[in-house]
Image (cartoon, grey):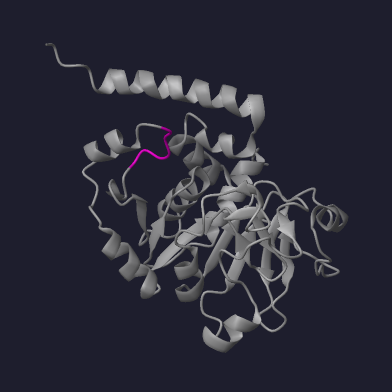
Amino acid sequence: MTEYSVDEQIITCMARELRGEYLVSSVTAFGSLAAHLAKSTHAPDLAVLSTPESGMDAVPLPTLSLGQFLTENQRAIPLTMEDIFDAIFTDRFRIWINPAQIDQHGNVNISVIGAWDRPKVALVGSRGIPEDTSHLSQGLYYLTQHTPRTVVEHVDFISGAGYNPERRKTLDGHGAPTCLVTNLGVFGWDPESGRMFARSLHRGVTPDTVREATGFAIELGSRIPTTEPPTAEETAIIHAADPLEVRKLELLSGKEAAEKFAAIYERERQALHAAWPRRRQ
């Protein structure tokens, strides 16, 4: 049996949702690795976007600080923001979004925790999620920590629309959420009821674990499949693409995250100096 970690299980599940001729944005380590893994295995027609500046299909992935330097040296295919929005509006774009909150109907929040006028926490804002949740036929989300604070009954602010009355009136289902991958399992939404259900649970996860970690009464069938674990090939591709384990930062917090960040940054700094020596004055 292949040994794997929870991050490798999440990334593999994310990768398996990607296929076809799409431009895939990789704004997080998990998103980058999922796109890279999919393209390396079952979806060769994907075009993986690092940033608009660095272009498509630039490797290695991911990095903390060297992305611009490394991708410039890869001669990646350049793109403009106009190209990206064209892909969104024609449903040729895919992105894995890591929300602060997601609710039972698939509404997501990356704007504020608490009331809008007096938030407990101010986040990055809705950014491109309104366009994604109104134009894309796949709404893709992931969480590294499935808890009652992240999977909630109602989000504090709707940054991206799930299944709600407004969608049924104006959007006709387009842009609705289709998949949520967490550290506990893979989830979807019933288009008729607009409610979340479990597609599969990861090995060792029980229905009671999911109920306790979810902020609403989630629908769980009597016989939920076990998520297919990563293969040896899939874990090897992840390790090769992320030798510094940048992906692990998404699982950590506090002192542990700070120490991991410092160690990765120092190794990247050494790699930059080795690859790009200073010119003599």
**Which residue extends farthest front?**
117
- Horizontal and vertical percent for residue 86? 31, 70
Comparing 195 with 228, the one in front is: 195
- Quadrant location, the C terminus: top left
- The answer to whether any part of residue 91 appears in the image is yes
Comparing 44 with 275, the one in front is: 275
- Horizontal and vertical percent for residue 135? 45, 75
Asked where in the image residue 84 lies, by quadrant, the reply is bottom left
Q: Is residue 78 above or below residue 191?
A: above
Q: Is residue 86 left or right of residue 190?
A: left
- Horizontal and vertical percent for residue 49? 35, 53
Residue at position x 54%, y 67% in the image = 139
- Quadrant location, the N terminus: top right
Residues in magenta, as a range: 59-64
Q: Is residue 59 above or below residue 117?
A: above
Residue at position x 30%, y 52% in the image = 52
Q: Is residue 159 left or right of residue 74?
A: right
Residue at position x 49%, y 50% in the image = 31
Residue at position x 43%, y 49% in the image = 36
- Horizontal and vertical percent for residue 90? 36, 75
Any magenta on residue 176? no
**Which residue extends farthest left?**
281
Q: Is residue 47 above or below residue 237?
A: below
